[in-house]
Structures are given as C-alpha cells and as structure tokens.
Image (cartoon, rainbow, N blue to C red):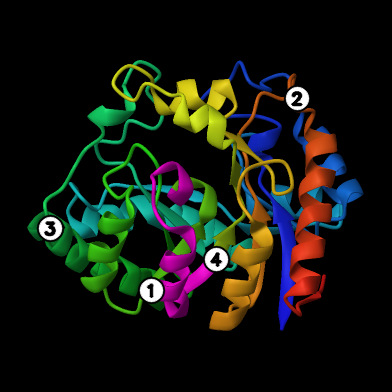
C-alpha cells in the first residue's frame, strides 16, 4: 500500500484567526514543509489565486497542491447557484493537479465566530440531514463530472459534527460523496474514531491526521467557549504530541485498504507551537505509524 505525506498551512497561519501567524510568509511555510519531508500541501489564504503563480511558487519547493477547503452552502443554497460559486475553485484545482475538493458545510457554521459557544452550533434532525444528503449528492455528482472528486469534511461547530450526524449523512448520500476522515475533529466531537473508520472506510478518500490534547478539550465549557477559543487554548496538535493513538488509526485505515494522502492539519498558536518544529514531529510520528501498518511512503 502507498501513502503520501502532506501538511496544511494552518499551523503557520490561521485564516480565521489572523493574529495566529498572520505575519508568517507563505514562503516560510513552504520551506518548512519541504525541510520536514512533506511532498504536498493544502491550500491556505496566502496562496496565489492563479494556476500559473501557484505552480511556480510550489515548484520552487518541490511541493504539490493536494487540495484545499471549499466553503459550501448546499444546506441553504440552490444547486445551480452552488455550482456557479464552486466553478472557479474547481477549475483552479484541476489546473494544478489537486486530487479532490475538501467540502466543508458553512451554512450556519459557528467555526469562525469567536463569541459563538460550542453548544450553539446548528443541529439538524435526521429528516433534515436526509434531505441535505440528497442535495449534497447532487452537488458531488457535479464535482465528479468536472473531474474533481468531493471529500466531505465533518467539522466541529458545523451542522455535521458528531458521529451520529456523520452516520446519518453517509446513509443518505450516494457514492459521489467521498469522506474526509479527520480523527481530531471526531475525537473533539466525542465520537469513536476507530468505529467511524469501520463504518465508513470504503467512502474515505482523504485523511487529516489532526491530534488533540484531551485535557484541554475536557476542560472546555461548551456553553460559553467557542471553537476558536478551543484553538487558542491548544485543543489541537500534530500526531505524536497529543492524545490520539495514531498507530491504531493508521492500522485501521490500512485494514480498509485506504491509500493516498495523509495530511497533518493542526491549527495552533505558532508562538507556542513553532510550526517548523511541529511539522517535523508530525512527520516523524506518521512515518512510524505508516511503517508499522505496512505502507510505503512515496513522493
């Protein structure tokens, strides 16, 4: 089995919290990622907007743009309007060779609102999720026709946060809706991170290896503290520095036959968690876990 290792720029600069790394250049991020051993990166807010500029800057560091976040609103938006909104990003991702589009449902999201407590996130009934699943499937089928597969990102402070939310959504979506598995977000949401792989392994098309600090998460007051408060307090970290057993996670992914990208994605305060150092910690931890599970790491 083959694995590729990438990293997201959010450990250097947080687009939702500019005070975290807003002064760190894209070039510093890419140089650190290359030095740590990664062969790919995900897109961040400081990346160029055109394919030519994107390929030029990534080429200087021998890195591939793997994918990036798309702020979807299929939950509230008509399908044709969503297609129109997504087309520019899809065209860019195709031009630079991305493997998928990371879809995050941002209709009613609280993930980027500092004063929105965690327990005020949008909650859908099973019937509402079923209807949403049908709409999301239609959008994912459009993405597939455009040759840019969709990877749905379950995410804290959004309408699809918990294990139950995800189970219901997967039951009401077609095969065009791939799953981005994020151990950190699922652990934060209180889900069983290994059971999610068991239940949805064939749908997993992309993996974020986000770790958590369990003591920080357990001490949060979800009635008053927000997702961004949790980030600032250090809820997330890289593999090898947190509470998740990534040997077990990677082995379970191997058992399902998953091959592809493993992306370190851990939003932290770069002053408290120096990005270059934590990029190396995450890389070394993943190399160890992937080796134990029988993966060959390729560039």
**x 85%, y 41%: residue:** 32
Kindly tell me whether residue 97 is visible in this rendering: no
- Tag 4 near tag 3, CB within 8 Å: no
Q: Which mark is residue 72?
A: none
Badge 3 is on which residue? 126
Within-10-Å neighbours for mark 1: few <14, some 14–19, many 20+: few
Q: Secondary structure at mark 3?
A: helix
For mark 1, give the secondary structure.
helix
| Residue at the (75%, 25%) spot, across then down | 24
- Indicate the quadrant where residue 48 lies: top right
**Residue 86 location, x and y as percent?**
39, 54
Q: Residue furthest left?
A: 127
Q: Is residue 27 magenta?
A: no
The region drawn magenta spans 186-205
Q: CA distance from mark 4 to mark 3?
A: 25 Å
| Vertical placement of residue 99 versus 79, above or below | below
Query: Residue beneath label 4, please?
Result: 206
Disc 2 and disc 4 in contact, CB within 8 angstroms:
no
Q: Which residue is mark 2?
A: 24
Near mark 3 (Cα within 10 A), the count class, few <14, some 14-19 or many ≥20, is some
> Could you tell me if the residues under marks 4 and 1 are in contact, i.e. CB atoms within 8 Å?
no
Query: How many angstroms separate mark 4 from mark 1 (CA)?
Result: 16 Å
Image position of 246 (left or right of 278): left
First along the sequence among labels 2 and 1 = 2
Q: Are marks 2 and 1 in contact (CB under 8 Å)?
A: no
Q: Earlier in the sequence, mark 2 or mark 3?
A: 2
- Depth-wise, is mark 4 or mark 3 nearer the camera? 3
Q: Nearer the viewer, mark 2 or mark 3?
A: 3
> Which of disc 1 and disc 3 is earlier in sequence?
3
Density class for disc 2 (Cα within 10 Å; few <14, some 14-19, many ≥20) is few
């Amino acid at each position: 089995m083959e694995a590729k290792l990438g990293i997201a720029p959010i450990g250097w600069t947080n687009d939702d919290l500019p005070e975290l790394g807003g002064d760190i250049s894209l070039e510093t991020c890419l140089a650190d990622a290359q030095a740590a051993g990664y062969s790919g990166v995900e897109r961040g807010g400081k990346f160029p907007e055109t394919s030519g500029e994107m390929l030029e800057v990534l080429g200087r560091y021998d890195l591939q743009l793997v994918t990036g976040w798309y702020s979807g609103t299929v939950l509230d938006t008509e399908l044709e309007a969503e297609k129109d909104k997504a087309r520019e990003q899809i065209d860019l991702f195709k031009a630079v060779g991305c493997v998928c589009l990371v879809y995050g449902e941002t209709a009613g999201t609280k993930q980027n609102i500092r004063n929105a407590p965690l327990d005020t996130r949008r909650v859908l009934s099973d019937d509402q999720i079923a209807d949403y699943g049908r709409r999301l499937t239609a959008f994912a089928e459009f993405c597939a026709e455009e040759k840019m597969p969709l990877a749905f990102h379950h995410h804290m402070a959004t309408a699809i946060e918990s294990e139950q939310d995800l189970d219901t959504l997967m039951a009401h979506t077609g095969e065009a809706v791939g799953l981005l598995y994020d151990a950190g977000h699922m652990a934060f949401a209180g889900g069983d991170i290994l059971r999610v792989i068991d239940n949805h392994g064939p749908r997993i098309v992309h993996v974020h290896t986000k770790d958590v600090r369990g003591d920080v998460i357990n001490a949060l007051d979800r009635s008053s503290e927000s997702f961004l408060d949790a980030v600032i307090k250090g809820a997330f970290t890289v593999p090898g520095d947190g509470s998740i057993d990534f040997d077990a996670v990677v082995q379970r992914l191997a058992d399902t036959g998953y091959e592809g990208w493993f992306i370190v994605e851990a939003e932290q305060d770069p002053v408290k968690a120096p990005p270059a150092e934590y990029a190396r910690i995450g890389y070394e931890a993943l190399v160890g876990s992937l080796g134990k599970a029988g993966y060959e790491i390729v560039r």
